[in-house]
């Protein structure tokens, strides 16, 4: 990993902060596209946002989210704490933490870009015909499998590079895979028509 990101806390923290804000901006953009017509063709049960903490703000399409600001401060503070405690004596632990934050965000942006281009095509062309409905449980299961795939990709890179930053991506993606699988296990597999009014 470049010394530029290891010589100081700020390059890594700033990169992650920009990606985190961009993640939320992409979420709101795709949620708008979903509400503007995609939901007539592709129905996601419940909220467009999978993370329960942000669902209320995303459902309301809030451009400025107090919850986002809270998480920026909390996560930035945790990263700073890891830097102070391990930055000099055990820099590998800081690299794992930074990799978990940044590489997860890059994977999230990949998902956003896929949704953005798909949703634009749905709203502007007849590329999608008919109507599909996804239960909340299936959405979370699919997300869990996708996070496992990203984790496997980062693990292969780690095997070749032995880079602890990349290993952080493995840890971060595995954590999200487990979280979404756990959320899915608590839900029925059927779509409830009374819960289809939110974004997904």
Image (cartoon, rainbow, N blue to C red):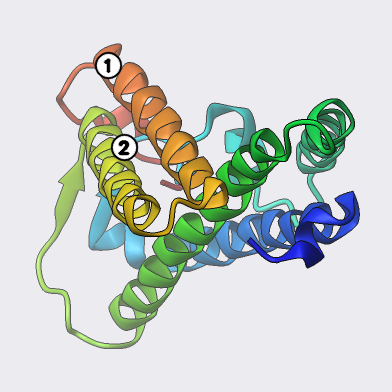
* Residue that badge 1 annotates: 187
Q: Which residue is mark 2?
A: 45
Res 90 quadrant in image: top right
Q: CA distance from mark 2 to mark 1?
A: 11 Å
Q: Residue 177 at x, y = what percent? A: 35, 32
- Between disc 2 and disc 1, whose residue precedes? 2
Horizontal side, residue 180 vs residue 86: left or right: left
Left or right, residue 13 beside residue 164 = right
Residue 37 spot, x, y in % from top left? 38, 68
Figure quadrant of the N terminus: bottom right
The residue that appears at 65% across and 53% down in the rendered structure is: 61
Q: Is residue 5 above or below residue 166?
A: below
Numbered-mark total: 2
Residue 89 visible to an observer of this rendering? yes
175 versus 127 height, above or below: above
Q: Residue at x 27, y 47 (%)?
A: 152
Mark 1 falls on what kind of element? Answer: loop
* Identity of the residue drawn at 15% across and 23% down: 189
Indicate which disc residue 132 carries: none
Other residues around mark 2 within 10 Å, as few (<14) / some (14–19) / many (≥20): many
Please provide percent x and percent y for residue 166. Answer: 49, 51
Q: Residue 47: horizontal and vertical position, in percent?
A: 45, 39
Disc 2 is placed on an element classified as: loop
């Amino acid at each position: 990993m470049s010394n530029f990101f290891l010589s100081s806390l700020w390059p890594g923290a700033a990169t992650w902060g920009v990606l985190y804000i961009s993640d939320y901006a992409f979420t709101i953009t795709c949620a708008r596209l979903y509400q503007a017509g995609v939901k007539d063709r592709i129905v996601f049960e419940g909220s467009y946002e999978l993370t329960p903490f942000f669902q209320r703000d995303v459902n309301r399409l809030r451009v400025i989210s107090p919850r986002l600001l809270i998480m920026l401060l909390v996560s930035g503070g945790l990263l700073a704490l890891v830097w102070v405690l391990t930055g000099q004596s055990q820099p590998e632990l800081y690299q794992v933490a930074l990799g978990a934050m940044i590489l997860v965000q890059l994977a999230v942006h990949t998902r956003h870009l896929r949704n953005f281009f798909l949703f634009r095509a749905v709203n502007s062309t007849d590329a999608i015909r008919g109507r599909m409905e996804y239960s909340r449980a299936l959405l979370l299961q699919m997300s869990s499998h996708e996070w496992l795939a990203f984790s496997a990709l980062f693990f292969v890179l780690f095997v070749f590079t032995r880079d602890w930053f990349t290993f952080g991506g493995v840890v971060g993606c595995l954590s999200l895979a487990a979280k979404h699988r756990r959320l899915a296990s608590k839900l029925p597999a059927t779509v409830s028509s009374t819960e289809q009014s939110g974004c997904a």
